[in-house]
Image (spheres, grey):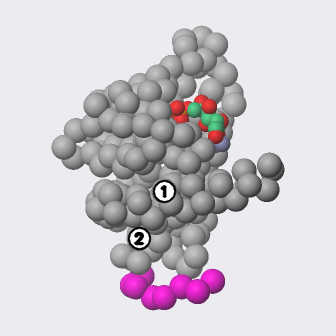
Amino acid sequence: MLEQRIQQHFIDSADLKYQAAQTLTAPIAAAVQAVLACVTSGGKVLACGNGGSAADAQHFAAEFVGRFERERPELGAIALTTDTSILTAVANDYDFTQVFAKQVRALGQPGDVLLALSTSGNSANVMAAVEAAHEREMTVVALTGRGGGRIGQAMRDTDVHICVPHERTARIQEVHLLTIHCLCDGVDAQLLGDQETSA
Ligand SMILES: O=C(CO)[C@@H](O)[C@H](O)[C@H](O)[C@H](O)COP(=O)(O)O
Ligand SMILES: [Zn+2]
């Protein structure tokens, strides 16, 4: 019945988060260091993904440019999912696989970070963005699931791969959002100190 289904979603989501805390803490800490090194040397984070992951990319950029929980200087982040003129022109004139890659080539500088979100690890446009980031000597922080897919296989030693150990898109996305908040909190803590936050 409906109530049971709803309760099961909460239980499954909580279970996965407990389990993933073991495996994802180290890569998330590595991602904090990569992003921190980028922004403290004047770099920026470009973020991309499809569907719910597009929303996650925008969520991250909003908290970096605006704020997370504490006041701090603005941090550079751009979601590559929002400019409908660029997205439609590139998809129409080239191919949908190029919608993020062309923006990475246009905006990316050595030392910038690409935050690449794909629950399957197989979205062709996110994969093309990873390749473009490598061309631009950027570091890639990839948030994936389902074993990491093609994006997982394209990771370099200097990249960070955060692969949620689950098969279901919704569950993976829920951990991606938690990861984004850990990234924002981790960067703030490194910049401002480890102050407790109760808000
Ligand atoms: O949010 C959801 C499902 O929860 C969907 O919009 C989902 O993001 C879309 O199907 C995406 O196209 C899936 O792409 P990806 O995560 O495999 O890269
Ligand atoms: Zn969703």
Give the Cα separation between the discs numbered 1 and 2: 21 Å
Please name the amino acid that badge 2 sits on: Gly
Residue 139 found in image quarter: top left
Q: What is the number of the mark on residue 63?
A: none
Question: Ligand 1 is located in which of the four quadrants?
Answer: top right
Mark 2 neighbour class, 10 Å CA radius: few under 14, some 14 to 19, many 20 or more: many
**Foreground residue among 168 and 58:** 168
Query: Mark 1 or 2 closer to N-term?
Result: 1
Mark 1 neighbour class, 10 Å CA radius: few under 14, some 14 to 19, many 20 or more: some
For residue 124, say whether it is visible. Answer: yes
Please name the amino acid that badge 1 sits on: Leu
User: What type of secondary structure mainly makes up the magenta span?
Assistant: loop
**Tag 1 and tag 2, C-beta contact below 8 Å:** no
At x 56%, y 18%, the residue is: 96
Total numbered badges shown on the rendered structure: 2
Left or right of 156 on screen, residue 77: right
At x 74%, y 55%, the residue is: 4
Residue 55: image location, x then y, percent: 64, 46
Q: Is residue 4 magenta?
A: no
Q: List the single residue furthest toward the right.
A: 2
**Residue range corresponding to the magenta coloring:** 192-199
At x 63%, y 83%, the residue is: 199
At x 51%, y 52%, the residue is: 176
Q: List the single residue furthest toward the front.
A: 1
Q: Badge 1 is on which residue?
A: 16
What secondary structure is marked by label 2?
Answer: helix
From the viewer's perspective, is residue 79 above or below residue 67? above
**Foreground residue among 77 and 55:** 55
The mark lying in front, picked from 1 and 2, is 1
What secondary structure is marked by label 1?
Answer: helix
Q: Badge 2 is on which residue?
A: 186
